[in-house]
Amino acid sequence: MTFLIAPIASIRGRDFIAVREGLWRVVDPVGAVIGYLERRAGVDGERYSARRIVFATRTRDLGAFCRIEDAIDCFRLC
């Protein structure tokens, strides 16, 4: 089975590394994982959720968005 993983450009030093189809790991300039971006299909279209890593085993939901650009914006200031 082959997955088509859409690349996301680096934004302000944040790299978006594809983990699997519809899931990206957000990495800061030092290489630390700071969160995740996930695409989910719903009855009303695709949604993009942003999660920030708070502690090693905990994440905090930053929101669910209709546009991937809005979800990416959550990581501009992290």
Image (cartoon, grey):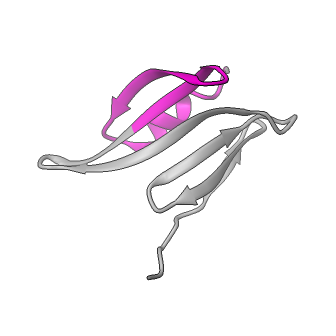
Segment tinted magenta in the rendering: 49-77
Q: Residue at x 44, y 56 (%)?
A: 22
Nearest to the observer: residue 14 or residue 2: 2
Q: Which residue is drawn at 67% across and 20% down?
A: 77
> Residue 41, percent across and down?
25, 52
Residue 57: image quadrant is: top right
> Residue 59, percent across and down?
53, 23
Residue lying at the far right in this picture: please name it: 30
Q: Residue at x 67, y 23 (%)?
A: 56
Q: Is residue 5 above or below residue 37?
A: below
Nearest to the observer: residue 60 or residue 28: 60
Residue 65 magenta-highlighted: yes
Residue lying at the far front in this picture: please name it: 57
Number of numbered discs overlaid on the protein picture: 0
For residue 10, side relative to residue 6 (left or right): right
Nearest to the observer: residue 13 or residue 56: 56
Residue lying at the far bottom in this picture: please name it: 1
Residue 75 magenta-highlighted: yes
> Residue 27, percent across and down?
72, 39
> Residue 1, percent across and down?
44, 82
Residue lying at the far left in this picture: please name it: 43
Q: In this view, does 48 lie above or below 22?
A: above
For residue 14, side relative to residue 62 (left or right): right
Q: In this view, does 23 lie above or below 58?
A: below
Q: In which quarter of the image is the C terminus?
A: top right
Q: Residue at x 59, y 61 (%)?
A: 7
